[in-house]
Image (cartoon, rainbow, N blue to C red):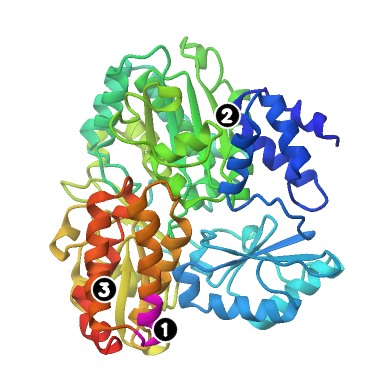
């Protein structure tokens, strides 16, 4: 397809920039973007060439250098590092005869790294074009590469398998996962799909918000902010138009809780988005999905098309007079876009860099208009609250943190995967009950709880109740509900270094404390891992992370205090011994 034909598939609006770049790269033989591509895109969108160039060079999934037919991205996140991801990269480099960033002479393979693929339950993992492979060994890797050369498939990708949902627990948002075909709306309708929307449309918007407020639903993205209150702010804000945005840019290492919703029951998210739009008075919604989640993107787009066909989207929803449209926006590889204002910048076709707050999105979000930004898991709870009522929802979880939570357990456990259980389930039950305990009968040493921006906790924290408030007893946060388990043989200095390397790579560079601080912390972490650090280095790490906490523009730089301080507080003896 000629370049101009690709461009004409999109309206000439700046917000379509990322989608156009994806489409052009996919049609090019080298999976890349040429200078001519950039120039024509700039002309078509009436943007400066520098703006387009700046976007292309910001996101990791774009390339200005020709790549092979198969782009192999090896995950280097802390969960994959723990399970042998760096050894896997070395082995792939040996098998292909190239280093990361290079392409084989026959143009077949390009080897790259990824900071997180969002498939931590099957670590170590790699992605080849849009397919993800997990539980990798040297033998499995060799078979996969041979499959690609021959056009066969003896090793199926994990994207072709059912999500690894652990048995037990209580299910609200995952109620349909594994029980319906995610691409058949009829399956969803049989199990009560869009009943919550019908109930919402029978109420006034302020009554919908009141129901969500009474349910006690708190944001499941990590902050735990009351959802009903956020909607109330957006509903009261003055603006000619309003937007509802779903943050599905799930890039936090150890976090894959939103993916099973989008892959296994996309209609639950679509329904939650429509209800949210009705509640705040928005006529348009966006679901911003990380670019690595190809299957999620595909299924959400199918769900949106089917919902529109059945009258759940459009100019007059179910004869209510309410008009609402919904669109999927595809990211391009930038962890920072999980920050709500950086996501909005990216959605508008810009580099995903955070805005200064205030103003907050509820007053000045998409196109500086009132916007409510919610997480996938948060929105997926809404249909059940409307269908069954806020009191029913409060029958789960705790008084302060009602409902269920998707917890994620991975690393040195017998059964890595995800589960949905009452908010406030103990860390011990997640590891030993659902996760099946420590592999090989070894002892529990540590868990990185809440994602890469979480806390390193030791055995005394096994009794911790995993909710937004109870975790404070252990100077910890719930975060995404992620639990990366480490046994007694693991090195805390090495795992801390892996976390710091992630943040060094993902800092967007906009503010100096984060840009310079992340790089320096990674250097010190490297010395610590190798046994070349001093006791003074430990003091510098703590002081520097404290400075970043108070002076960085956004949570990326602010959050490094959590892994650094918790490692020093709970495993200080091991770190000091390594630094002697």
Gap in angstroms between the C-alphas marked 2 and 3:
41 Å
| Label 2: element kind | helix
Residue 467 image offset from top left, x and y in percent: 23, 55
Picture quarter with the C terminus: bottom left
Of the two numbered discs 3 and 1 on the same chain, state the one appearing first in sequence. 1
Q: In this view, does 405 lie to the left or right of 177?
A: left
Observer-nearest residue: 275 or 356? 356
Residue 458 seen in this snapshot: no
> In the current view of this chain or complex, which residue is farthest to the left?
473
Gap in angstroms between the C-alphas marked 2 and 1:
47 Å
- Residue that carries the numbered disc 2 in the rendered image: 15
Residue 489's quadrant in the figure? bottom left
- Residue that carries the numbered disc 1 in the rendered image: 439
Question: How many neighbours does mark 1 have within 10 angstroms: few (below 14), some (14-19), or many (20 or more)?
Answer: some
Residue 533 seen in this snapshot: yes
Q: Is residue 291 left or right of residue 96?
A: left
The secondary structure that dominates the magenta segment is helix
- What residue is at 58 percent from the left and 74 percent from the top? 135
Residue 367: image tag: none
Q: Give the range drawn in magenta.
A: 525-532
Question: How many neighbours does mark 3 have within 10 angstroms: few (below 14), some (14-19), or many (20 or more)?
Answer: many
Question: How many neighbours does mark 2 have within 10 angstroms: few (below 14), some (14-19), or many (20 or more)?
Answer: some
Please state which of the two labelled residues, at mark 2 or mark 1, is closer to the viewer: 2
Residue 226 image offset from top left, x and y in percent: 24, 37
- Say if 136 sits above or below 8 in the image: below
- Residue that carries the numbered disc 3 in the rendered image: 567
Please state which of the two labelled residues, at mark 3 or mark 1, is closer to the viewer: 3
Residue 541's quadrant in the figure? bottom left
Residue 94 image offset from top left, x and y in percent: 70, 82
Of the two numbered discs 2 and 3 on the same chain, state the one appearing first in sequence. 2
């Amino acid at each position: 397809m000629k370049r101009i034909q690709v461009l004409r598939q999109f309206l000439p609006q700046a917000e379509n920039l990322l989608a156009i770049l994806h489409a052009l790269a996919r049609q090019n033989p080298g999976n890349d973007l040429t200078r001519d591509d950039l120039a024509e895109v700039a002309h078509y969108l009436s943007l400066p060439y520098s703006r387009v160039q700046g976007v292309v060079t910001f996101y990791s999934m774009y390339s200005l250098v020709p790549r092979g037919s198969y782009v192999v991205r090896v995950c280097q996140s802390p969960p994959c590092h723990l399970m042998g991801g760096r050894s896997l990269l070395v082995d792939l480099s040996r098998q292909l005869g190239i280093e990361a960033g290079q392409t084989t002479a026959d143009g077949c393979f390009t080897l790259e790294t990824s900071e997180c693929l969002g498939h931590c339950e099957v670590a170590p993992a790699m992605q080849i074009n849009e397919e993800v492979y997990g539980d990798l060994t040297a033998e499995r890797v060799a078979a996969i590469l041979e499959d690609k050369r021959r056009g066969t498939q003896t090793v199926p990708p994990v994207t072709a398998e059912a999500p690894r949902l652990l048995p037990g627990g209580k299910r609200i948002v995952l109620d349909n996962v594994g029980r319906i075909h995610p691409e058949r709306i009829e399956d969803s309708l049989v199990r009560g799909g869009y009943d919550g929307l019908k109930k919402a449309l029978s109420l006034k918007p302020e009554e919908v918000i009141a129901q969500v407020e009474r349910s006690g639903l708190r944001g499941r993205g990590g902050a735990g902010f009351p959802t009903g209150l956020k909607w109330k702010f957006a509903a009261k804000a003055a603006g000619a138009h309003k937007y509802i945005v779903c943050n599905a840019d799930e890039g936090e290492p150890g976090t894959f809780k939103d993916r099973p919703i989008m892959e296994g029951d996309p209609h639950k998210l679509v329904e939650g988005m429509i209800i949210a739009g009705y509640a705040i008075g928005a006529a348009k919604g966006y679901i911003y999905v990380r670019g690595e989640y190809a299957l999620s993107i595909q299924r959400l787009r199918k769900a949106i098309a089917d919902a529109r066909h059945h009258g759940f989207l459009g100019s007059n929803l179910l004869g209510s007079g309410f008009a609402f449209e919904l669109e999927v926006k595809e990211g391009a590889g930038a962890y920072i876009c999980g920050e709500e204002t950086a996501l909005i910048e990216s959605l508008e076709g810009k580099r995903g860099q955070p805005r200064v707050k205030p103003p907050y999105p509820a007053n000045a979000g998409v196109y500086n208009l009132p916007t409510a930004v919610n997480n996938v898991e948060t929105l997926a709870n809404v249909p059940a609250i409307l269908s069954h009522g806020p009191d029913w929802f409060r029958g789960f979880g705790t008084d302060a943190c009602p409902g269920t939570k998707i917890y994620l357990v991975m690393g040195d456990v017998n059964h890595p995967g995800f589960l949905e259980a009452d908010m406030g389930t103990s860390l011990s039950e997640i590891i030993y009950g659902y996760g099946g305990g420590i592999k090989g009968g070894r002892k529990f040493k540590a868990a990185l709880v809440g994602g890469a921006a979480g806390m390193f906790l030791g055995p005394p924290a096994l009794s911790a109740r995993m909710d937004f408030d109870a975790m404070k007893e252990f100077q910890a946060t719930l975060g995404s509900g992620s639990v990366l388990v480490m046994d007694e043989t693991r090195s805390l200095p090495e795992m801390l270094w892996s976390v710091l390397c992630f943040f060094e790579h993902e800092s967007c560079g906009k503010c100096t404390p984060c840009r310079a601080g992340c790089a320096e912390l990674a250097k010190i972490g490297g010395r610590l891992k190798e046994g070349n650090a001093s006791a003074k280095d430990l003091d510098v790490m703590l002081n520097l992370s404290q400075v970043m906490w108070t002076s960085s523009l956004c949570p990326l730089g602010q959050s490094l205090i959590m892994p650094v301080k918790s490692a020093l507080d709970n495993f200080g003896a091991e770190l000091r011994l390594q630094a002697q």
